[in-house]
Structures are given as C-alpha cells and as structure tokens.
Image: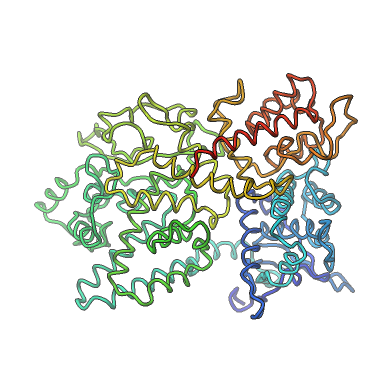
Amino acid sequence: MTLTTDLRSEALSVAGVFSPDSRYSVPAYQRNYAWETPQIEQLILDIKAAMHEQTGDQAPKSYFLGNLVVQARPLSPGSKITEYSVIDGQQRLTTLTLLLSYLSRARKNSLQLPSNPIENLTYDSRPRSAETLRLISHVTSAGELPEEDRLDAGIVNAFGIISQTLKQLDKDLNLDAFTRFVLDQVTVVRVELPFGTDLNRYFEIMNTRGQQLQQVDIVKARLMSVLHNGNHDPAASAVEVAAFAWIWDACAEMHSYVQQSLTMGNTSLRSKMFTAGTWAWLKPQSFAELVESWTAAPPSSADPCDSSSSQSGFPRATTMSLDEAIKYYEAVPADIAEEESDAEQFRSTIEYPSFLMHVLKVFKGHAAEADGGLDDSHLIRSFDEEFSKHDAEHVREFIFLLLRARNLFDAFILKREYLARSSDEGMWSLRRVVKRSSRESRRGLERQSIGYVGTFAPGEHPEDSDSDVEYTASEIQTHVVRPGQFVPGGLLQLQSMLRVTYTSPRTMHWITLVLDFVLQQPDPTNVAERDLLEILLTHTRSRVHDAYFADVPPVGFSIPRIVFTYLDFLLLRGNHVPGFSSSFTFGFRTSIEHFFPQHPSEQPGEGEAVSNELLHSLGNLALVSVSNNSRFSNLLPGAKAEGFKTTIETQSPKLALMASMTRAAGAWNDALVKQHHEDMERVLREDLSNWS
C-alpha cells in the first residue's frame, strides 16, 4: 500500500465540503488558528474579484481555493455522517467556517445555508476554540461576543476581520450573490488519506518532495523557450538561457536583497554587477553587458574545489594547480566564508508573482492605469498576451528590466524588518544595500559583506555619510531623519499607510507608480524622497477624493479605509494631536470603531449621548484593530478615553484626538461629534487643495 495509489481525492464546492453528512475535527497536534488581516482580506477580495469576472453568456467558472487533506475516522454504528480528521488545510477550513457563519446570519442575506457551518467543525482537546465557534454561530460581529479569557482570541479576531471587511464592501457587493458564489463556485479538492496512514511518514514525504509547478515556473519556461528559439548560435543561446534562469531565480527570492541572492558568496561578481564602492545599484546597462560581466567573473571562493556550477553558473575544474589557486585567492580575497542569507531579517511587501505583474505593467507602458493588470491569478495569460508574438529581443529587454526593477524595489519599497531590538511583529523599514569591510584577524584578510542603511541617508559611500551610526528603533520607524534631509512627512510613513490600507496585492497600484518613476531615472542616486512623496501623495489624494468627496459623503461602514488611514497620516504630519506619541506606526487596523457605541453597555448621562443622525458620521468613527474593537466597543466614550488611553494612542491619531476632546469636555456628545466631523473634513479638503 502506498500513499500515491491509495489517496482518494474529489473536487467539491464549498457547499459540498460543508454537506450535512460531513464533519471535520482538528487534531490536538495541529497549531492554533493563525490567519490575520492580510490572508483573510485577500481571500475575500479574491473571491469577490472572481465573482465579478463571471459573464452572463458563459457557464460560471469555478474559483479554486486549495486542498484539504483529511483522514476519515471509523463510522459510528448506524451513523450516516463521516467524520474527518483535518491533516492539512485547517487555516482555510476554519476561515471558510467563519465566513459561512457570518453570511448565514447577515441581515441583508436572504439565502439560507443547508446547515449550520459551525456544526461541521470541532476541535480535539481545544475547548476554547470549540466554545468560541459555538458563540460565533449566534452573532454577526465580534463586538457581540463576551470578553472572556475562555475564548480563542485568534478565531475571534478572524471573525471580526470577516464581518468588518464584508460590511465595508457593502456598497458594491450583493451579499446574496456573493454567498451563492461561495457555496457553488468556490471549489476545494478534498484529499482523503487511507485510515491507518502513518501521518509522520506522510508529513516527511510532503516536506521533502519537490515543489509543485507554479504559474511562475510555466512563465519562466515559456520565456526561456522564446529566448532559445530566437538565437541561431547554440553556444550563445545556452549562455543567454542560463543567464535568464540565473536572474529569474535570484529575483524570485523576494525576502532577500537581490545583491545577495544574485551573487551569494561571490563578492567579485557582486562588484561587477553592482556599483563597486557601495554595491547599491545595478551597474550593467543592458542584458548583453550583464551576461558579459557574468561570464567574466571569477567563481565564488566559498568552496574553490567545488566541481559543480559556481555562482556565475559555469562549471569549474575539479582540481586547481598552485598557480591557479594563488590567482584565484588573489582575485577574490574577501570571500572567507559563505554569507548568511538575509531572508530571515526582511519580509517583502509582495510575493514574486505579484512583483512580476508590477514589472510587466511597467514594461507594457501601462503604469499610469489606476486599475487592473495586477491580478497574479492571470499571470500566464498576461505574459502570453505580451510575448507570444514577440522575438527574443523582447525577452532580453524584459529580463533586464526585471533585474533593474528588483534592485530598485528593494531600495524604494518598504519591507518588514525583524531585529533583536524590535518586537516579534517587526517594523517597517526602507533601506538600501551598502558594502561593509572588516579585517579577518586570523589571516589578516579584508572581509567584505552586505550591510544596510536608510535609503535616503546622506552620501553614497559609508565613509562620507552617517550610515555607520547605529539608529534607534524610533529613528528607523520615522525613516532615519537626519540634519539636512528633506522629510516633509516621511516616505516610509506614507508607504506603511498605503500598505495597511490596500492589503490585497492586486490593489497595490502605488508600487507600480514608484517602480515606473525610479526605472525612468538614469541614476538611482539622484532619486529624491521629495519626488516619491509627491507621486504617492498625488495617488492617495485621488483615492481619497473618489472615496469621500466625489459623491454624497459615505457614512458608517461604507467609508473606505483610505479615508481613515490618510486622516491619521495628515494628523500625524500636522501635529494636530497635542501630546500624541511620536512612536506611532501604521498597523493592520481594520475595524471601524463607533466612539459613541451603537449598543452602549450602560445608559449615558445627561449631555453624553450621540443622536442616530450623527452616530455613523465620520466625526464619531475611527479605525482600530479588531481585538481592541472587541475589548471596548460598547463602552461609553468617557470610559474609553480614561481607561484605555495608552491603547488608544497605539491605534489611531484620530481616535486619540477624539479621546482628548472627551477628557477636556468631560463628555462626548452631538456638539463634539459635529465639531470633530467638520474639523476632519476641513483637514482633508485643505490637503486635497494641493492636488491637481
């Protein structure tokens, strides 16, 4: 009996997965539920986008969500219900359960689900998770749940994200149609392992098998084929195809700076490929020049007797003569040991398929288009449309642009950085590569390695800038403000605002705009922060205008997130909140908080109430995390302002301003809501007056 021959798999609609005759149990050894805002929002937005792509003239298309690996448990005598242990896919199964639970109870949804989805999922030896699901089956928002330690915070948070996301999509989402699409057109492949399968063996096989073929692999193979077929010289063709693969694979390592992934352990090659004094910027000016530098570079010294291909892609001899060894070490004395990857220190804002879509959009000259062109589920189709009728030169131009774009992306688009002095969640970072030199005491050789400095730190070389200074965490968060540096608001702060506002990669058009601009500059050292700020401010102001001022101003959950996050950005820039902490950073805060609650936990006193007319206005709303919305959602404003002062300051400058007004006046009422509402609209209008 083998795993491959005895697997049973079937493609099921979500309705089929949650049929009344199926039950799922999450074993005790599985990790806790861990999906957060980026994963949950992207799932919902991807399903919404797939639904809107359907056309009335064609049969509905299925949206494939992924695999669910299960193992059937023995049937109870006389039972018609099959119970499955969830082996792989717990995160998406739990998310689907929460999504269906919300949809089944949403007031605007007239459709009835065939069964209560909560009843289909249980947890072995995890009573908190089971109790949380039971309570969720009776509510439509996380704020209605009791604040108790016996609940699973991760599941509560996820349910809050789902309810908030769908409420904010209310204007352009028919909930009945969305529910029907989820049930009928979203598909999951349920893979059933035979009963008695050695799960340790299964996980060993799954963890050691080769990676599945992805869309990026197919695109890579097709582009390499165009390159190969367009060159009549077999030797030259082989070199170009190998160079293409080398560049493509290096660019694919999104969580490392490309200087490292392209030339790991080979500083001689790195100095040929990137500016010699700093390693900051790509040096070749064309694909042909890049290939020439690549083929001429000496191999890495990490293992001089390695007979396999070197970092430059060409085989080396299995042995070296004494003269060859001397010449070799003279050529690359800096490589004393293999470098450690920086992939654990940095996390990219987007993954490789999304990055390819951004670069393709720039390559086609469509960067200015505000919508479309970034859906990586259409990766193959998008590349086929562009390259199927073009020759090898078109591919050469693209792969060189891809490497240039990756180099500039690393320096001019924020990342998440994880340092010993920062929290587990990391911090926003905007840095470029700089070359570091040190002496290896044992052999007296100079060691060169990659370091990092704020992208706009003065001076290109470490010796004439302040790049060797150890920055504090707060300085890094505010983009390392130094004397003489133009930072009207902080590019890092603006990018982090956009990052948490537009969580789905297909909506991150601001990245395309930055890449398009920096790729047009002949020398990256001349890219000014002022210019990038203006580009992104123009983009953001356009979005805010369309979201709030283009028609009758929206209210309540219909107010797009960009209105709140941009207000926080403006309040922070203009010092509108007296005494507000300068260490505030933008995080994934997705819940719209009613400062005066919709369902107060106690009766407000005289002059402390807010009328229904103003309850859902911008003046009574702010953006907070789902967990904090659950903590103090139903408290009166005075209790929030006095009891959660520190928490409020980490959530939103706008919320902090509202709390400050409440403490000063001793109450929060219609007059203050109206005043704050008018103040916030004035802040937005004054800023938008700079937009043309």
Q: Position of residue 329 (x, y in %)?
A: 17, 47
Q: Is residue 497 left or right of residue 359?
A: right
Q: Position of residue 451 (x, y in %)?
A: 34, 38
Image quarter (top left, top right, bottom left or bottom right) of the N terminus = bottom right
Q: Position of residue 438 (x, y in %)?
A: 26, 33
| Residue drawn 44% across the image and 53% down it | 512
Q: Is residue 598 left or right of residue 346?
A: right
Residue toward you, 567 or 400: 567
| Residue 688 higher or lower than 315, as above or below | above
Q: What scheme was used to colour the molecule?
A: rainbow
| Residue drawn 89% across the image and 24% down it | 606
Res 687 visible: yes
| Residue drawn 53% across the image and 38% down it | 689
Q: Position of residue 309 (x, y in %)?
A: 27, 62
Q: Is residue 650 left or right of residue 594?
A: left
Res 8 visible: no
Q: Quadrant location of residue 667?
A: top right
Q: How many marks?
A: 0
| Residue 160 higher or lower than 599, as above or below | below
| Residue drawn 64% across the image and 46% down it | 548
Query: Looking at the image, which residue sits at the far left?
Result: 323
